[in-house]
Image (tube, rainbow, N blue to C red):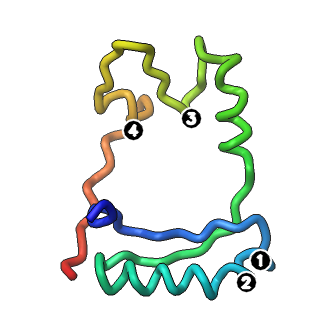
């Protein structure tokens, strides 16, 4: 039951051709997850921007920017770490009942 708390399943490709070539296999997983857990399926074309930033993070641990939360050994994780200044906390999403 490790997937029961997920709400969406997203296929990310770097081009429309990549999405098209992976869709058949992705739909098998998506159909199972929709029937079993009520997940929604979506597709998007992505970039390596976030992964590239993550790879450069070790050199910037003192100032990781607003894309990452860095917690040192023994540090405490709080909800406030995940809210940008001036933004309110996101409203909880409703879960579809299966």
Q: Nearer the N terminus, badge 2 or badge 4?
A: 2
Instruction: Residue at the far left: name it.
Output: 97
User: What crowding class fits label 1: few (fewer than 14 Cα within 10 Å), some (14-19), or many (20 or more)?
Assistant: few
Q: Which SS class for mark 1?
A: helix
Query: Does the residue at mark 1 contact the one at mark 4 (Cβ under 8 Å)?
Result: no
Between the C-alphas of marks 3 and 4, the distance is 14 Å
Q: Residue at x 24, y 67 (%)?
A: 94
Q: Nearer the N terminus, badge 2 or badge 3?
A: 2
Query: In front of the other: label 2 or label 4?
Result: 2
Q: Is residue 59 left or right of residue 77?
A: right
Q: Is residue 91 left or right of residue 56?
A: left
* Residue matched to label 3: 67
Q: Which SS class for mark 4?
A: loop
Between the C-alphas of marks 1 and 4, the distance is 33 Å
Q: Position of residue 49 (x, y in %)?
A: 72, 45
Query: Does the residue at mark 2 contact the one at mark 1 (Cβ under 8 Å)?
Result: yes
Q: Position of residue 19 (x, y in %)?
A: 71, 77
User: What crowding class fits label 2: few (fewer than 14 Cα within 10 Å), some (14-19), or many (20 or more)?
Assistant: few
Name the disc covering residue 20, or none: 2
* Residue matched to label 4: 87
Q: Which SS class for mark 3?
A: loop
Report which quarter residue 3 is drawn in: bottom left
Q: Position of residue 91 (x, y in %)?
A: 27, 53
Query: In front of the other: label 2 or label 1?
Result: 2
- Quarter containing the N terminus: bottom left
Q: Is residue 89 above or below residue 58?
A: below
């Amino acid at each position: 039951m490790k997937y029961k708390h997920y709400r969406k399943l997203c296929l990310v490709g770097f081009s429309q051709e990549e999405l098209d070539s992976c869709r058949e296999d992705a739909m098998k997983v998506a159909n199972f997850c929709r029937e079993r857990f009520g997940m929604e399926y979506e597709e998007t074309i992505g970039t390596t921007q976030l992964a590239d930033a993550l790879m450069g993070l070790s050199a910037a641990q003192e100032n990781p920017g607003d894309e990452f939360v860095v917690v040192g050994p023994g540090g405490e994780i709080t909800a406030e770490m995940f809210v940008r200044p001036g933004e309110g906390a996101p409203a909880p999403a409703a879960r579809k009942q299966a």
